[in-house]
């Protein structure tokens, strides 16, 4: 009887303990049984089958070979929604991955205050060959107002431009890419006349609608206005800002997009452009490797890139452009060997050798000034993107990047999406402003 | 109700011991999160570990009922519950009765009707998304058969988006309720039908005067489960539209998720969770009271 009792106790104990151990599996802060073993967890957007992802994976493999006692857990997600969900859970629990990215700058203060973000400036200064190679502007972007230091290592940059199909433009009788907003509207009419979708738009992936508005916003009120919105010197319901949303509405009314754009994902919109069904697509340099691959893009030879047209009434913002700037951020909770190895991995992922490989093989630009590019190995589209991107005077990423409220990413994008389903510009603006007003109630 | 009396402490110890793992699971994954939701529903928190959690009393609940998105979600939930109840059980009943006649090929039909229940609802939702997306199979079919005029973005159009999701929910649930009703049908003695047949009752009369009354408790259970299940639907909407565009197809469950994880309104999201709990609880209590009243 006694034996039975102990067996039962053991079974119940094992089951209960197993459960609790399972719950705690990810909460061991990177260390396993032995202190010598280290686990590094990554949560980036580097997932999928693109060339840049395979280079990223090569670096991880190289790191594993160099440090065999390190286990790499790569939780990276290519899908923005899935990525945001995982990141939100990590942020709420405080169980941050070692390497991750949070979009925005002004909203980083809460993360810094709670020790979730590492100031990387000492490490950049310590290794001048690595740290000194980044462009000043890209590092300055991650210097959060009111805080000492730099809170991310930049890993991706480049102009978010308008990629267009020269052949379709030619068929529609458009000789040169529209330089101004009025010319853009004329081009849209001509493209509609030949039965082509003028601009590929998958607004169900709300970032596409957001990027469209970002472009209009920077050309109408300039990149500094985004900072003014973030500092509350401007409101979303200000006439000038509402006008930027009205221009989105004007494009919809001009049939610039597929009638069903609000129900189409970015992938479907991308396919429309790559298959030659749509004449333009607003996207970043991450799409270049797809657009230059004939297997993925049968119309690859006809694709070119230009900046988003400016408004004749606002020539002062002609060179205010939207550019992508993505970071690797490092958990502020790391210490000892775990921290050293994480820094080492970030160095391997962003040094000048790998930056050269990224640029030449994947048309993926790490914002470094010391890349010895062999232009003959780069695609024309990538070179053109770099050339026109270098003329930008004012640079903005997403408008909400400058907002201290982290909810603004989804609020602004969803409200812009609502314009695609019949909301007025004023309604969208009021909805966005209400998010701010409620937060400060 | 007859309760087993445990003879001694030893037996009580064993019972407790075997209950312990499931009790821990229940506490960890049900009671603790529930307590967490109740706690956060009266707090304000930005969702960042380490940030201050401030007591705000009933402010979050006030915001929930003033939030137009929540009112849209409630309306959508009402549509979902009403149409699910109207279609699930009646269609499942008819299907079960036909299959119970053991007609030719009944096994195949039984399996076919049950297949949607086997799939995870998120997978079914994704499949139907590809059918109903603007460039999807359904619109292509309409165009191919010359009904291009009916082509519409089913999951975006204000008048069709929620109805399309309700349709998929009905499709996905019929098999489940059919199996429950089939089990109920096997409890009706064959002799009753034979006696009715001798008395001259036809198929229709037997259905309305015998089958339906004798399945009353099963049908009531199906309706109760359907109401509660429809209130809790999340995965289907999440996979098909994510509650969008801009909240048009949100249910309280998806709104909870969006408010909490997208907009980082942890307090508001938790308050929505508590409201959903209250709705489910009220639904269950009312249904139980109705069932008890009828059986008395």
Image: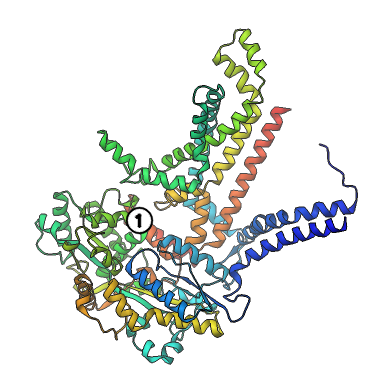
- The percent position of residue A60, horizontal first and vertical second, equals 43, 75
- The percent position of residue A202, horizontal first and vertical second, equals 31, 55
Left or right of A130? Residue A25 is right
Left or right of B88? Residue A79 is left
- Image quarter of residue A392: bottom left
Asked whether the viewer can see residue A250, the reply is no
- Image quarter of residue A275: bottom left
- Quadrant in which the N terminus of chain A is drawn: bottom right
Q: In the rendered structure, the residue with mark 1 lies on which chain?
A: A
Secondary structure found at label 1:
helix
- Viewer-proximal residue, A110 or A40? A40
- The percent position of residue A113, horizontal first and vertical second, equals 53, 78
Left or right of A341? Residue A50 is left
Residue at 51% in and 29% down:
B91
Identity of the residue furthest to the right in this view:
B8
Residue at 81% in and 36% down:
B1
Is the residue marked by circle 1 packed among few (<14), some (14-19), or many (20+) residues within 10 Å?
many
Taking A102 as reference, is B278 above or below it? above
Residue at 52% in and 40% down:
B117
Asked whether the viewer can see residue A42, the reply is yes
The image shows a total of numbered marks equal to 1
Residue located beneath label 1 in the image: A417
């Amino acid at each position: 009887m006694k034996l039975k009792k102990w067996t039962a106790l053991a079974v119940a104990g094992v089951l209960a303990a197993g459960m609790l151990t399972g719950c705690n599996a990810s909460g061991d802060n990177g260390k396993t049984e032995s202190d010598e073993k280290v686990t590094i967890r990554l949560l980036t957007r580097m997932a999928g089958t693109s060339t840049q992802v395979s280079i990223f994976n090569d670096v991880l493999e190289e790191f594993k070979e160099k440090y065999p006692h390190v286990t790499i857990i790569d939780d990276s997600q290519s899908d923005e929604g899935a990525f945001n969900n995982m990141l939100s859970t990590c942020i709420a629990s405080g169980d941050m991955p070692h390497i991750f990215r949070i979009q925005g700058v002004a909203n980083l203060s809460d993360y810094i205050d709670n020790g979730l973000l590492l100031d990387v400036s000492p490490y950049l200064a310590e290794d001048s060959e690595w740290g000194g190679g980044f462009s000043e502007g890209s590092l300055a972007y991650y210097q959060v107002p009111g805080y000492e230091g730099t809170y991310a290592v930049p890993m991706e940059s480049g102009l978010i431009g308008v990629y267009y199909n020269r052949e379709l433009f030619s068929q529609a009788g458009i000789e040169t890419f529209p330089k101004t907003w009025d010319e853009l509207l004329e081009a849209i009419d001509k493209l509609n006349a030949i039965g082509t979708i003028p601009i590929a738009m998958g607004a169900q992936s709300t970032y596409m609608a957001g990027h469209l508005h970002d472009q209009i916003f920077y050309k109408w009120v300039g990149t500094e206005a985004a900072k003014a919105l973030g500092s509350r010197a401007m409101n979303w319901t200000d006439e000038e800002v509402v006008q930027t949303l009205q221009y989105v509405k004007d494009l919809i009314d001009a049939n610039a997009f597929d009638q069903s754009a609000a129900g189409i994902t970015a992938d479907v919109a991308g396919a429309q452009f790559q298959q030659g069904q749509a004449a333009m697509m607003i996207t970043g340099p991450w799409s270049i490797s797809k657009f230059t691959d004939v297997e993925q893009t049968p119309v690859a030879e006809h694709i070119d890139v230009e900046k988003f047209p400016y408004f004749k009434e606002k020539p002062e913002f002609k060179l205010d452009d939207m550019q992508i700037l993505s970071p690797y951020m490092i958990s502020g909770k790391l210490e000892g060997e775990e921290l050293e190895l994480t820094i080492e991995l970030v160095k391997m992922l962003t040094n000048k050798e790998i930056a050269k490989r990224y640029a030449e093989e994947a048309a993926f630009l790490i914002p470094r000034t010391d890349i010895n590019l062999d232009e003959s190995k780069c695609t024309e589209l990538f070179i053109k993107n770099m050339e026109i991107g270098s003329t930008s005077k004012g640079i903005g990423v997403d408008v909400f990047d400058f907002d201290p409220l982290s909810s603004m990413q989804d609020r602004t994008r969803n409200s812009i999406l609502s314009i695609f389903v019949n909301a007025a510009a004023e309604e969208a603006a009021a909805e966005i402003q209400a998010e701010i007003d409620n937060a400060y109630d | 109700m007859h309760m087993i009396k445990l003879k001694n402490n030893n037996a009580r110890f064993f019972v407790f011991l075997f209950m312990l793992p499931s009790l821990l699971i229940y506490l960890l994954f049900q009671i603790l999160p529930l307590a967490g939701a109740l706690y956060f529903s009266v707090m304000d928190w930005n969702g960042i570990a380490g940030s201050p959690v401030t007591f705000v009393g009933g402010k979050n609940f006030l915001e929930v009922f003033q939030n137009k998105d929540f009112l849209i979600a409630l309306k959508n939930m009402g549509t979902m519950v009403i149409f699910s109840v109207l279609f699930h059980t009646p269609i499942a009943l008819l299907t079960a009765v036909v299959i119970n006649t053991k007609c030719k090929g009944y096994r195949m039909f039984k399996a076919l009707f049950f297949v949607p229940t086997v799939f995870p609802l998120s997978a079914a939702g994704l499949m139907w998304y590809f059918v109903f997306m603007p460039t999807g199979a359904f619109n292509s079919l309409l165009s191919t058969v010359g009904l291009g005029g009916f082509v519409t973005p089913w999951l975006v159009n204000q008048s069709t988006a929620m109805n399309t999701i309700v349709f998929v929910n009905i499709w996905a649930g019929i098999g489940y309720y059919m199996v429950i009703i089939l089990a109920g049908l096997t409890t009706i003695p064959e002799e009753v039908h034979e006696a009715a047949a001798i008395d001259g009752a036809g198929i229709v009369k037997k259905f309305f005067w015998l089958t339906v009354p004798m399945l009353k408790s099963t049908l009531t259970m199906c309706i109760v489960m359907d109401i509660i299940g429809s209130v809790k639907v999340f995965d289907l909407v999440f996979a098909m539209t994510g509650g969008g565009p801009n909240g048009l197809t949100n249910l309280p469950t998806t709104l909870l998720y969006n408010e909490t994880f997208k907009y980082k309104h942890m307090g508001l999201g938790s308050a929505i969770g508590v409201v959903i709990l209250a709705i489910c609880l009220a639904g269950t209590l009312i249904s139980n009271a109705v069932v008890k009243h009828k059986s008395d």
